[in-house]
Image (tube, rainbow, N blue to C red):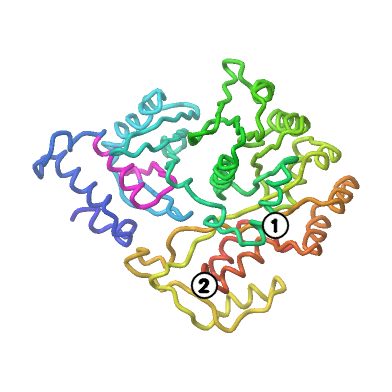
């Protein structure tokens, strides 16, 4: 019996790629005749992997080594799904081809490596970021798919409500200080930053960015990539960019003291600065800056606006329905101090959402305009919990508040909120 037909891991997904693997294996072994030149080649198979991942809206491809197979998994709407198994006899060639695409030595590696390239996928330019690392099972590769089309969103389309959008618009009008987009890894920070860049581009202002690496190219915006091997560090790039007399400057991500200092340097010159930072919520942003050895007085001098976010799955519009709120959802809401509704929305599952009940994702947002009271608390070195409480008392809704509003409207489900909160919202303390 063919393994791919019987595998419970791949059958429920009903994905074309699993069938293509079957067909490809048949052509390689001679069981079936190739229909076109090259259909038995490893490059053809890799192309089909990328093609199906893009068609399925996957953001990442994981190639996980197992005893007999290389498991191909797609991350779709934030969830990893097994889609096919490639026999080990073809795995080394397949992994070697992926690495050669991004100029990584195709031989098995003894230490981690990464690379990137722009891949032409039948007329669509997709940015591939590849990371490979040795494990005790064998070599694992993960591939981040960056489709420029995914960045063509307005701020409203990302999930910001009118009040949150107004806070951002007011900041854009004032043109001072620093805005930080914060969240966990994979929370959509880059998408939000580029949406902001597109808004700024419409204001007839000069916008320059310093990124490591440049993930997407934006027409009308000057972009510089950090290259420490050639002496282009964050600090040197900032000095250079400031001489270009920009109105807005973006530092892609504050990941260490050097990039944070570069951002603060730019902000202190009176330029408007945008950047991103790993943090679980708005109050956690101050803690994250402190952990980068940024002093409280430096934070209050620069920080004007924090947009904290998390991605959550949307309910499928084709099969969602209202039903009595499940006991486990009620219990969770009551445990964190919220009243549970009698009725709530859920996804039944249909062909449109591949029986998951969800289709695409939307952002949960907490937008905090740092005022004088907040600056006073920061200068007193107020702890994160107390700062979070002060933000709530000032009337700023939390990520969970935003999520519950979206759940009440049928945009997402309470079950999905409960799942995401288990990863640490920073909203219940």
In the image, what residue occupies the spot 65% across and 73% down? 333
In the image, what residue occupies the spot 62% across and 53% down? 309
Relative depth, front residue between 347 and 93:
347
Corner quadrant of residue 255: top right
Query: Residue 135, image x and y in percent?
Result: 47, 36
Label 1: few (<14), some (14–19) or many (≥20) C-alpha neighbours in 10 Å: some
Residue bearing the label numbered 1: 426
Query: Residue 398, image x and y in percent?
Result: 69, 62
Kind of element beneath mark 2: loop
**Figure quadrant of the N terminus:** bottom left
Residue 194, relative to residue 41: is it above or below? below
Corner quadrant of residue 259: top right
| Side (left or right) of 169 relative to 386 | left
Report the residue that reaches farthest toward the front. Answer: 204
Start-end of magenta stretch: 44-71
In the image, what residue occupies the spot 65% across and 25% down? 234
| Side (left or right) of 209 relative to 2 | right
Residue 213, relative to residue 33: is it above or below? above
| Side (left or right) of 408 relative to 45 | right
Residue bearing the label numbered 2: 410
Name the disc covering residue 164, or none: none
């Amino acid at each position: 019996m063919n393994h791919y037909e019987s595998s419970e891991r791949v059958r429920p997904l009903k994905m074309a790629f699993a069938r293509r693997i079957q067909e490809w294996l048949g052509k390689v072994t001679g069981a079936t005749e190739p229909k076109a030149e090259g259909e038995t080649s490893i490059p053809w198979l890799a192309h089909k992997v990328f093609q199906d991942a893009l068609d399925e809206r996957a953001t990442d491809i994981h190639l996980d080594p197992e005893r007999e197979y290389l498991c191909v998994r797609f991350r779709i709407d934030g969830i990893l799904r097994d889609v096919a198994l490639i026999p080990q006899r073809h795995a080394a060639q397949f992994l070697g081809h992926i690495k050669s695409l991004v100029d990584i030595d195709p031989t098995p590696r003894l230490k981690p490596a990464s690379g990137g390239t722009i891949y032409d996928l039948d007329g669509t330019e997709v940015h591939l970021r590849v990371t490979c690392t040795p494990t005790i099972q064998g070599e694992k590769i993960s591939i981040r798919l960056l489709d420029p089309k995914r960045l063509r969103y307005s701020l409203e389309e990302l999930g910001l409500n009118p009040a949150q959008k107004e806070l951002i618009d007011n900041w854009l009008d004032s043109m001072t200080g620093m805005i930080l987009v914060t969240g966990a890894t994979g929370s959509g920070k880059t998408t939000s930053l580029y949406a902001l860049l597109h808004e700024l581009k419409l204001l007839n202002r000069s916008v320059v960015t310093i990124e490591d690496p440049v993930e997407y190219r934006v027409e009308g915006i000057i972009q510089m990539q950090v290259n420490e091997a050639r002496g282009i560090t964050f600090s040197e790039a900032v000095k250079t960019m400031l001489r270009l007399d920009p109105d807005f400057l973006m530092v892609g991500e504050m990941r260490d003291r050097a990039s944070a200092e570069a951002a603060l340097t730019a902000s202190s010159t009176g330029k408007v600065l945008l950047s991103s930072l790993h943090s679980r919520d708005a109050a956690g942003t101050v803690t994250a800056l402190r952990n980068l050895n940024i002093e409280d007085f430096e934070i209050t001098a620069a920080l004007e606006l924090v947009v904290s976010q998390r991605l959550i799955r949307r309910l499928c519009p084709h099969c969602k329905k209202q039903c009595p709120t499940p006991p486990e959802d009620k219990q969770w809401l009551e445990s964190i101090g919220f009243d549970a509704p009698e009725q709530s929305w859920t996804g039944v599952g249909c062909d449109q959402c591949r029986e998951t009940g969800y289709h695409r994702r939307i952002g949960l947002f907490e937008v905090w305009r740092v005022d004088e009271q907040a600056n006073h608390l920061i200068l007193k070195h107020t702890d994160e919990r107390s700062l979070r409480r002060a933000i709530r008392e000032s009337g700023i809704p939390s990520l969970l508040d935003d999520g519950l509003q979206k759940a009440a409207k049928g945009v997402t489900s309470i079950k999905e909120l409960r799942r995401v909160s288990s990863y640490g919202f920073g909203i219940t303390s």
